[in-house]
Amino acid sequence: MINKLVKKIEENKAPIVVGLDPMLSYVPEFLQKKAWEQYGETLEGAAEAIWQYNKGIIDAIYDLVPAVKPQIAMYEQFGIPGLEAFKKTVDYCKEKDLVVIGDVKRGDIGSTSTAYATAHIGKIKIGNNSYVPFAEDFMTVNPYFGIDGIKPYLDVCKEEKRGIFILVKTSNPSSGEFQDQLVDGKPLYELVARKVAKWGEECMGDSYSYVGCVIGATYPEMGKALREIMPKQYILVPGYGAQGGKAEDLAPYFNKDGLGAIINSSRGIIAAYKKPEYAKYGETSYADASRQAVIDMREDINRVLVSH
Amino acid sequence: MINKLVKKIEENKAPIVVGLDPMLSYVPEFLQKKAWEQYGETLEGAAEAIWQYNKGIIDAIYDLVPAVKPQIAMYEQFGIPGLEAFKKTVDYCKEKDLVVIGDVKRGDIGSTSTAYATAHIGKIKIGNNSYVPFAEDFMTVNPYFGIDGIKPYLDVCKEEKRGIFILVKTSNPSSGEFQDQLVDGKPLYELVARKVAKWGEECMGDSYSYVGCVIGATYPEMGKALREIMPKQYILVPGYGAQGGKAEDLAPYFNKDGLGAIINSSRGIIAAYKKPEYAKYGETSYADASRQAVIDMREDINRVLVSH
């Protein structure tokens, strides 16, 4: 799946992943109204609203980007109907041949991580049958448990040719509270990065590992150091746009081949129609605004990559 | 909710939480057969099998223990039907007046953590209505993001009088890989513990905080040090029984008042009928075996607490 991701990034000339993190407040009135008419102001109604909203965006952008990253929390907050909308979204994106990164940030002891890996990137055997519970291509994983919390994912990655992105340095303001603490004179996130590089060796695709990492866009200096520690890791970079990361800051995350990083934008794309520069599209053409925002983001990032 | 947990622990004289972590291989043949007859060897069938299995155990133990801890991964691996079984299990436990600790180990940046807190211990507003998506009383949380990944949970705890258990030192063999790294001469888990104690100050119940922590049963020495750092935290202790923790090791996790810790057993209780000492119950009386295992565990732990 990492080979497919790299190929699609090259074909689209877009190292971009669109974060499908719908908030009810992003969903245009007309879609909300339709959903309430059908299901009432219920969990089912909210789930329908975010699903229809997603579908509009996916239809508008699927030919421009290699990948999407639905954040499961945004669905989980609508209970079972919300998780059904998550599944519908994943399935629809796969129909459109998009690479799907499940942003689930799971992490636990071994036997439990096996269950999470099965749920998101694996298969479950029931009697003589086998099922794919959620069918993402990649999932994000928390490293706090160390290798025996990670190994079950590696096993499933090898078996299924799917992948994971392990949190190394997150994009939020307080990420340094634990991640930046010095261990033998080096920040903890560097130790995590060295482990990720090592773990990734046994899951190599053609040029990159099935085991990637997450590093926030807000730390270009750290990005540079971490890039060197993990040359074979794809870096999933959240924090561009809404969280303050600028295209100029992104160059250090890429390798000399112009590959090795994929930049996430969520709100900046999916709620583009709410921004002054795309206001002309209006609510009913929210998906066209998202398409234009992708085009603009692609240009913004490629400008920096060319001069890199 | 922490007050209710403490009260129920005292009433039952049982600082015990039963981990409802069903594996399909634990479910007795006769229940599996019934589920396959009804739904086939499908995700729905598996979900029905684990739900019926859980129900039998809950009916057999609810008057003996204060709390249960369903591990969501074990349900998530069966997709949407599995998560429906999770919800049914939570709801049924609440009907039986059990305190429910959702073992979900979520953790993310602020806005995403808000969504997770809403999903598991909060309420979601949809138009003029408000819904409780999953309705646990407590949830487990990963600290890797630092305070702004934790604050949304604290806010919901205060609002809803529900609680969280933050991972400090996990029970798995490789937990030390990052958690034991020395930061200013002290292990990282101690730094996390000091933060947990601080964060918990603003969410106090009568004698304990709504913010507890998780420390594996396999480290009695660490338990002692961490108990002192976090006198107001309830410690959720996994790893007793199947993972190798012994009752003798548990004393340091408790305060002098005999409170302050709650010991989890999963497989040792729910799959008791598979152990030689409970084999006499047989498959069909698997729930009676679980009941006896709870009684034996209670005795085992109280023996140590008395001499404490």
Image (tube, coloured by chain):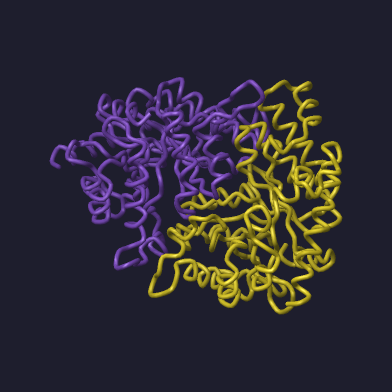
Chain colours: A purple, B yellow
Looking at the picture, how far across and down is residue B273, in whole percent? Answer: 79, 44
- The answer to whether residue A180 is left or right of residue A13 is right
Name the residue at the left extreme: A307
Looking at the picture, how far across and down is residue A295, in whole percent? Answer: 29, 31
Q: What residue appears at the point 32 percent right and 57 percent down from the top-left corner?
A: A190
Looking at the picture, how far across and down is residue B187, in whole percent? Answer: 45, 69
Q: Is residue A26 placed above or below B199 in the rendered structure? A: above
**For this rendering, which residue is in front, B186 or A102?**
B186
The quadrant holding residue B263 is bottom right
Q: What residue appears at the point 67 percent right and 56 percent down from the top-left corner?
A: B138
Quadrant the C terminus of chain A occupies: top left
The quadrant holding residue B214 is bottom right
**For this rendering, which residue is in front, A255 or A238?**
A255
Looking at the picture, how far across and down is residue B45, in whole percent? Answer: 72, 27
Q: Is residue B170 placed above or below A204 in the rendered structure? A: below
Quadrant the N terminus of chain A occupies: top left
Name the residue at the front extreme: B276
- The answer to whether residue A285 is left or right of residue B237 is left
**For this rendering, which residue is in front, B203 or A38?**
B203
Residue A46 visible within the image: no
Residue B118 visible within the image: yes
- The answer to whether residue B235 is left or right of residue B30 is left
Q: Is residue A222 placed above or below A285 in the rendered structure? A: below
- The answer to whether residue A231 is left or right of residue B115 is left
Circle count: 0
The quadrant holding residue B282 is top right
Q: What residue appears at the point 63 percent right and 70 percent down from the top-left corner?
A: B233
